[in-house]
C-alpha cells in the first residue's frame, strides 16, 4: 500500500515538473539561456533559421549581430515578461516582411531599442529607422510580392496541367497500342484457323474424288 502511495506521489511530482518545464519552455538551439536571458547573438541566424519560439519566462532576448532581415510574425508576442531586446547589427530588409517588426517596435517605449533598428535595404531606404517607415510604401511592396506569388502559382498550375495532359496522352497511346496488339493477335488467330479449315476441306474433296473413281 505504501509503495503504491509513493508511486502516486512521484507521478504527481513528475507531472507538475513536466508542466512547469513546458510552461517555461526549452532553450532553443543554437542560443544559450541563463535564467531569463536568452542569448542568440552572433549565431549567424537568418530569418528562416531563427527559432520559432522562446521560453515564456524570457526577460532579455539578444538577437544582435546576426543576418536577420525580418522577424517571423508573432515570435515575440508570447513573451509577456520581456524587458529588453537587442536587435542591432542585423541587415533589416525594409519591404513587406518588416511589417511585424515595425508594428512591434511602435508598441515599445524604449527609445534606445528603436534607434538601433534601421534599414539596410533597399538602397533608397538604407539608414531609415524601421519605426519611421511609411506603411503605404511597405504595403505597395506587399502587392508586388503577392503578384510574384500569383505569377509563380499560375506557372506551377500551367506546368501541372501540361504534365497531366502528357500523362493522359501517354496513357491513351499505351491503351490503343495494347488494343491494336490484341486485335492483331485475334486477326492472326482467325486467319490461321481459316487456313486450317480450308486445308481440311480440300483433303476431304480429294478423298471423295478418289472413292468415286
Image (cartoon, helix red, strand yellow):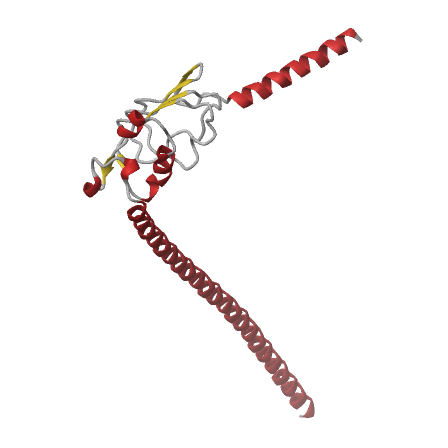
- From this view, report whether residue 98 is shown above or below residue 167: above
Quarter of the figure with residue 183: bottom right
Percent of width and height locating residue 153:
39, 55
Task: Identify the residue at image location x=29%, y=44%.
Answer: 134
Percent of width and height locating residue 38:
40, 20
Please tell me which residue lies in front, 204 or 57: 57
Percent of width and height locating residue 143:
33, 52
Task: Identify the residue at image location x=46%, y=67%.
Answer: 173
Using residue 203 as the reference point, say whether residue 141 is left or right of it: left
Please tell me which residue lies in front, 149 or 63: 63
**Residue that protrudes farthest toward the top in the picture:** 2
Please tell me which residue lies in front, 88 or 25: 88
Percent of width and height locating residue 13:
65, 14
**Residue that protrudes farthest toward the left in the picture:** 123
- From this view, report whether residue 106 is shown above or below residue 81: below
Quarter of the figure with residue 204: bottom right
**Residue that protrudes farthest toward the right in the picture:** 1
Residue 87 visible, this orientation: no
Number of numbered discs overlaid on the protein picture: 0
Residue 99 visible, this orientation: yes
Using residue 24 as the reference point, say whether residue 141 is left or right of it: left
Please tell me which residue lies in front, 203 or 50: 50
Quadrant containing the N terminus is: top right
Task: Identify the residue at image location x=25%, y=33%.
Answer: 118
Quadrant containing the C terminus is: bottom right
Quarter of the figure with residue 131: top left
Using residue 177 as the reference point, say whether residue 96 is left or right of it: left
Amino acid at each position: 500500500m505504501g509503495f503504491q502511495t509513493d508511486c502516486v506521489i512521484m507521478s504527481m511530482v513528475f507531472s507538475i515538473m513536466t508542466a512547469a518545464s513546458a510552461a517555461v519552455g526549452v532553450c532553443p538551439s543554437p542560443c544559450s539561456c541563463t535564467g531569463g536571458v536568452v542569448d542568440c547573438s552572433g549565431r549567424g541566424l537568418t530569418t528562416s533559421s531563427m527559432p520559432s519560439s522562446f521560453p515564456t519566462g524570457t526577460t532579455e532576448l539578444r538577437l544582435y549581430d546576426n543576418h536577420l532581415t525580418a522577424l517571423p510574425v508573432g515570435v515575440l508576442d508570447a513573451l509577456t515578461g520581456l524587458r529588453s531586446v537587442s536587435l542591432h547589427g542585423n541587415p533589416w530588409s525594409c519591404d513587406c516582411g518588416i511589417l511585424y517588426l515595425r508594428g512591434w517596435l511602435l508598441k515599445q517605449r524604449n527609445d534606445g531599442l528603436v534607434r538601433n533598428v534601421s534599414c539596410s535595404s533597399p538602397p533608397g531606404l538604407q539608414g531609415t529607422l524601421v519605426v519611421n517607415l511609411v506603411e503605404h510604401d511597405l504595403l505597395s511592396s506587399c502587392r508586388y510580392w503577392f503578384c510574384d506569388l500569383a505569377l509563380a502559382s499560375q506557372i506551377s498550375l500551367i506546368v501541372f496541367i501540361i504534365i497531366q495532359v502528357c500523362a493522359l496522352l501517354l496513357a491513351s497511346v499505351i491503351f490503343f497500342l495494347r488494343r491494336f496488339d490484341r486485335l492483331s493477335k485475334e486477326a492472326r488467330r482467325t486467319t490461321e484457323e481459316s487456313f486450317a479449315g480450308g486445308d481440311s476441306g480440300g483433303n476431304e474433296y480429294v478423298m471423295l474424288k478418289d472413292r468415286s473413281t
